[in-house]
Image (cartoon, rainbow, N blue to C red):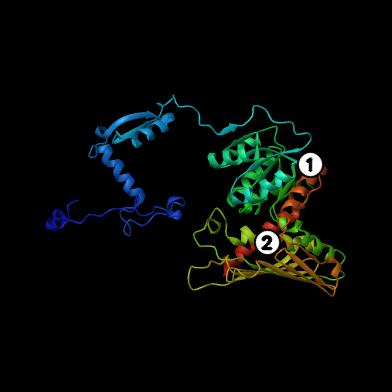
Amino acid sequence: LNRADFYIKEIDFFISTSYGPGRYDQSYEEGGLDYPISYVRWTENRNMAEYLRLIASGQVQVTPMIAMRFPIDETSAAYAAISGSDKPLVALLTYPNKGEEAAPCRRLNFRASPLPTEGKIRIAVVGAGGFARSSHLPNLKELSKKFSLRAVVNRTGPTARAVGEQYDVDYVCTDPAEVFADTEVDAVLIATRHHLHGALALAALKAGKHVLVEKPLTLSPNELTELQAFFVEGACEGVRVGSITAKPILLTGYNRRFSPYALRMKELVAKRSAPFIFNYRMNAGYIPADHWVHGPEGGGRNLGEACHIYDLFTFLADSEVIAMSAHAIRPATDHYGRNDNFVATLSFADGSVANLTYTALGHKSYSKETAELYVDGKIAVLDDYKSLTVHGAEKLSIKSRAQDKGLMNELEQFAIGIETGEWPIPLWQQVQVSEIAFAVNEAFLSV
């Protein structure tokens, strides 16, 4: 561009950033939250729509620029052509005509038939995100005497393939229905984002699979009712009646109760002569407001993470909640949300009281999870699942070099539950944890 031409004619030349406003904005591109046209005229989508309109009207001609055409399955050759010395201006990728296209591939088999499992539990993992890859998949590999990893399902095929090759599974796919319909799958571990948990768990259970679903069990009260009704005869919302029918096991991934520290605290309160008081503090750390945990996929930090602690309270009390109160701070800015900083207090039918302080206001140098349990003249002090010091019952004190939140033991208990039919976490407790989380959310909204 010759600056003089623009200067003489007083012409302004603007270059759009990438595709236009909205690019790299997750709430715009993935959440569908548009910018008002009076605020931003040419957004990413409006730019594309106008360009397509210009092509359709013939005002923009692209056909004369097309020098070469390649079928979509010859993409490598197309890239080689535009990278060579005699580069075409445009190399076009062509797709089959309507009716000629092959069905999309949703499954990739690594072997023709499954390997002998020798009585192991044949399990499929649905959701191969960071947590599954860092925790569940390595643990399943270590527990290879109990589990045989049959398949991995993930929303994106390349990740599914990479994980499948790493863990030598029979096949990978992008559709959970594949493993739900697979007669060679006994159990399913669901580790997707939170909003999918309830529906996927129910679909797997209806297909006859045992289910370990990561926390939270569900973000929807309606889904919770459906899950309860699947197991309990005559169940209805807010009422626990009837008996659990002979159906697959459901285990929500409240792993902290399976840690050696929680088991020692359980031993401490098991023979108590009076109710206990339990103060739990979670120094959760700050997560940006646009992170998926805060949005519809995550449900917020109360539903998505604090549920772990509601389960620990329920585990120790082994009693129904009869009263609850919750209070959140309201900062002057949007830097923090109500799910970031709150206090929830629960009263149980046995008289015990448990209190959770959940905050993103603290410093990361301090332990993330600390607690004090007061019971029968004794005090148990938990420090980040690395140590438990019991004053008045020193034999129950425990310390380890590495943090242990019970993830491995959770899988072991899942295997035992499948083998024996004894649920690692009773259904009513799993339901109660979700009900507590829903009630805490409602308390935030009522303020």
**Location of residue 251 in the rendering, given as x and y in whole percent from the top left corner:** 72, 49
As drawn, 362 above or below 190:
below
288 vs 207: above or below: below
Q: Which mark is residue 246?
A: 1
Residue tagged 2 = 436
Q: Amino acid at mark 1?
A: Ala
Q: Secondary structure at mark 2?
A: helix
Q: Give the x, y percent position of residue 341.
A: 59, 69
Residue depicted at 77% across the width and 37% down the height: 120
Residue type at the position of mark 2 = Ile
Q: Residue furthest top?
A: 100
Give left or right: position of 258 versus 369: right
Q: Mark 2: few, some, or many residues within 10 Å (few <14, many ≥20)?
A: many
Q: Nearer the viewer, residue 427 or 421?
A: 421
Q: Horizontal and vertical percent for residue 207? A: 68, 37
- The CA span between labels 2 and 1 is 27 Å
Q: What's the residue at 77%, 67% (across, down)? A: 388
Q: Mark 1 and mark 2 in contact (Cβ < 8 Å)? A: no
Look at the image and tell me whether residue 259 can be seen: yes
Residue 278 in sight? no
Image-quadrant location for residue 112: top right
Left or right: where 443 falls relative to 61: right
